[in-house]
Amino acid sequence: MIPAAWAMLRKDLRIELRTRESAPAMILFSLTVFVLFHFGVRRDEIDGALASGVLWVTVLLAAVLGVNRLFASEREGRALDGILLAPVDRTAVYLAKAAALFLYLVVLEVVAVPAFAILLLGPGLGGALPELPLILLVADVGLAAVGALVAALAAEARARDVVVPLLVLPLYVPLLIAAARATEPLLTPHPGPHGLAKWLGFTGVYDTVFLLVAVAVFDYLLED
Amino acid sequence: MAAKPLFGRGLRLLSVITAITLLTGFALVFFYAPLDADQGVIQKIFYVHVPLAIVSLCGFVAGGLMAIQQLRTRDRAWDMRSYVAIHLSIVFGVAVLITGSLWAKRSWGHWWVWDEPVLVSYLIVFLLYCCYQPLRFSISDPDRQSRYASVFAIAAGAFVPINFVAVRLAVQHVHPRVLSETGGHLPGKMMLAFYVTLLGVALLFATLWKLELTSKNASEQLRRLRRSFEETPPGELPAEAPEPVGVG
């Protein structure tokens, strides 16, 4: 299963490197959203809960773009039939797609978080290291686990572009709560008590539950 | 194809029991349970709001369990059951949000309060399940439709408890909540009225669920009859004459 998933992932990354359709779009989108927030909240510099919320809502919205595009190449060429002809476990498809989404999210954050610090953040990122990358990585696992499942779920729906955000954003709410709470003290000049372990632990539970659920039910999505 | 009975077995009995339990419950609420010292008569909405919320959440989770059964057995009937359970829970959910808002307006002065974790998590769950039908009916192939709907129901069923934990962790407890310690502080008379209405609402859910399944079954049979009738050349009886379906 792992070699098959690895092969699929390499294929997806090669397509992404050639077409540059997902990750660059997510990055551009996040920069645009920062500009929107700047005018929307009419502040030059933000910190604390507001900064953490703006950062995470932006990441979530950019993730929706990635989820929407995740099965695009398979759909456009009806290539999924070909993949399903291969005698490999269907779960490999899920793992490859989730891994691809995870990598897109990491690329997005490598660019978007420093850009956020330059454009909007008051206190600077110095106080947020090394915790913030850790929070981002743990949350990305959950974003990718749920995102890949929803992408497959919506792949057959007619109103796909509408179904994906409506489905995935409520599912992301627990992650948003935990990640934004964990990030909030890191972006505050004089932070109070820190609940990092609690929120990271919760995010870990979320990741585990949805990875297990997705692996258990994914086979049924790709049956024919 | 032997005709199934048109009405689900025991539907009439179930409706009678439901009506009696609900009426008893409401009688207890208005004539037996004491008036809340703080909130006055508006607190009575608690006996409708909380049972509706509990029953609809159980309905969502039950829809997920029925979906598991559907994926395991490949029986479309389980998909129908899961669909009807979720559909009804959404309808109950609208009532939960409306009664919750009314209660919040009267006792806290706002239509919506963000620091009430149960209310907030309920809204998120409700928003998620609102996508169930759009997703389901945007897939045309019936077999695939039932599989995808089941996958959604399972993932969303797992989401319900996680979401409640997250919202509860996030909200500092500000308001005293009537049911937070599962009714531990409720006086006995209120408790009795609450449990009877809870049972009544649960029975109401079961009755409506059965009724909806019956109606789906009836229209399915009607469609089949019509098809076999149309396919028969005039002057001949249909090859497999469907028995007249009994009523009651």
Image: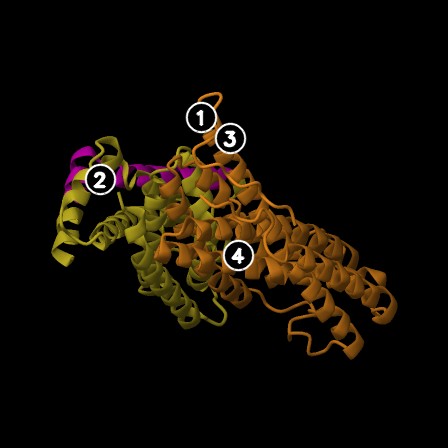
- Helix, strand or loop status at disc 3: helix
User: What residue is at 35 percent from the left and 62 percent from the top?
Assistant: A207
Q: Which residue is mark 4?
A: B60
Against B236, is B38 above or below? below
Same subunit under labels 3 and 1?
A: yes
Q: Left or right of B175: which side holds A104?
A: left
Instruction: Give the left or right position of residue B100, taking residue B69 as reference.
Output: right
Q: CA distance from mark 2 to mark 3?
A: 39 Å
Q: Which mark is residue A80?
A: 2
| Mark-to-mark CA distance, 3 and 1 | 10 Å
- What residue sits right under mark 3 in the picture? B226
Chain part drawn in magenta: A11-39
Which mark is nearer the camera, 1 or 4? Answer: 1
Residue B56 x, y percent position in the rendering: 59, 57
Decide: few, some or many residues near mark 4? Use Cα within 10 Å; few <14, some 14-19, many ≥20: many
Q: Between disc 4 and disc 3, whose residue precedes? A: 4
